[in-house]
Image (cartoon, rainbow, N blue to C red):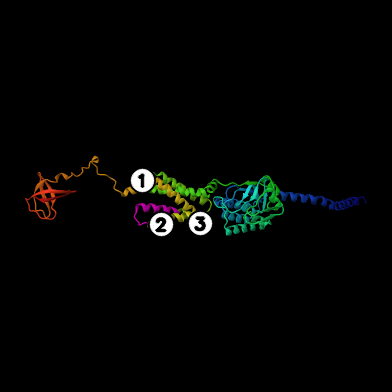
Amino acid sequence: MNSMIPNRQRYQGWRTALRLFPLLMLICIPLFSMAIDSARAAESSSAGSVYVVPVQQTVESGLYSFLDRALTEAEEAKASLVVLDIDTPGGKLKTAEDIGKRIREAKVPTVAFVSGKAASAGAYIALNAGDIAMAPGSTIGAAMIVDAQGNAIENPKLVSFWSEEMKSVAEMNGRDPYIAIGMVDPSRLIELKAIGETKAIGQIISLSAEKALKVGYSDKNVKSVDEVIAWKGLSDRTVVDFQPSIAERISAAVTSSGIGILLLIIGIAGIAIELLVPGFGIPGVIGLIAFGLYFFGQSIAGFAGMEALVIFLIGIALLILEVFIPSFGILGILGVASLITGITMGAYDTGNALQSLGIAVLVAAVIVSVFVYIFRKRGIWNRFILSEQLTTDKGYVPQESREKWIGQEGITTSLLRPSGMGEFNGQRLDIITSGEFIEQGTRVKVVSVDGTRILVKEV
């Protein structure tokens, strides 16, 4: 009987354990779930950084290459978000279209943070992002098409095309498309019911951060990039402050319209001056440096390849050969054609490159003309002109004047038929008659002298 007590105690212990098992499970499962969530959170916090990319310059061709590099790196790093920090007055519409397309095709989420102003092409870039956040005091809009001088372009086709582009990207993210049209077309009457305003004809829409939020052109008003990241719930992620490289900064500067034309002017004028007024060296070096910067900027921006530079250098070589080798202009024509081809091949837009080149040629022609006039005595044309003077002070003895023989008499020493020889005051001279023959030994008189021609007649 006593031997059965331990077995009974063991049986009761198992029964107690089985009764407590559900309670233990109720306690352990939440703890296990919390551990899994913590592990997932830790894994999530370490995966996918946030890239902050500045868009704080004029929208030029160099900006596209920079943003393309930034988005590509963010995609390769599997970034959680790309924040486009926008503060730009706008720029080239063609570049804005390319940037907008690249943003739409990005494989990572994007947010446009308007920290200053997103005007013109900048508004288009912002509307292509997945979300828009705006800082207090910032604006978005004013996308009317203007020329280089800031004057409105009223071409109906261009206005209609750009209005449709703005409308399309606004609709893509569920924004009022007519507000986007009102940012471009001053001829449209647009009602902004959310803020109780109406855009009159002749005006264009530009929205402050507060108004943009009310009409749906901003999703959040924030004060900084950190608040944008917090708004997206990514404050625990690593922030990558993406900045352009030194080469990209140089490229952005030299690919801008004004600097590009200036480099072409300096390059053309420098090379032309060196060819026409040789001996300085400095204009040629400056010209080559200017062209080098031009092609360097276009190359970094992704527009100019090695073939464009090679064709351009061939053009320079042909122009040099034209100066020294007579080719009836063939080498010169081929050289000019090569220069134009190289420059246009290395540009973002062929039409714009030809326009810039035309302006540069006209300005450079004026500079070269002034320079050549000032240093005309050193011009290459002097190689083909005999400028040496045979003067007495250089050792040359001029021919003695024969005017003194007029009126003097002498004897012919040969038969004059009609020219021959005669002796005058003991000096033998070549003489000639007016056509008649005179026998040797006849007395004659000098009647006139014409250069080296001494005319005589019989006495």
Instruction: Name which of mark 1 and mark 3 comes first in the sequence.
Output: 3
Q: Which mark is residue 376?
A: 1
Residue 15 vs residue 317: left or right? right
Kindly identify the amino acid type of the residue bearing the numbered disc 3.
Answer: Gly
Check disc 2: other Cα within 10 Å, few if <14, some if 14-19, many if 20+. some
Instruction: Farthest residue to the top: give it.
Output: 393
Instruction: Name which of mark 3 and mark 2 comes first in the sequence.
Output: 2
Q: Which mark is residue 163?
A: none
Kindly identify the amino acid type of the residue bearing the numbered disc 2.
Answer: Leu
Q: Nearer the viewer, residue 118 or 222?
A: 118
Q: CA distance from mark 2 to mark 1?
A: 27 Å
The answer to which quarter of the image holds residue 108 is bottom right
Residue found 51% across the figure and 54% down from its top? 352
Residue 255, visible in the rendered structure = no
Foreground disc of the pair 2, 1: 1
User: Which range is magenta?
Assistant: 310-329
Tell me residue 2's x, y (percent).
Answer: 92, 50
Q: Which residue was labeled with disc 2?
A: 334
Q: Main secondary structure of the magenta part?
A: helix
Q: CA distance from mark 1 to mark 3?
A: 36 Å
Kindly identify the amino acid type of the residue bearing the numbered disc 1.
Answer: Arg
Q: Which residue was labeled with disc 3?
A: 351
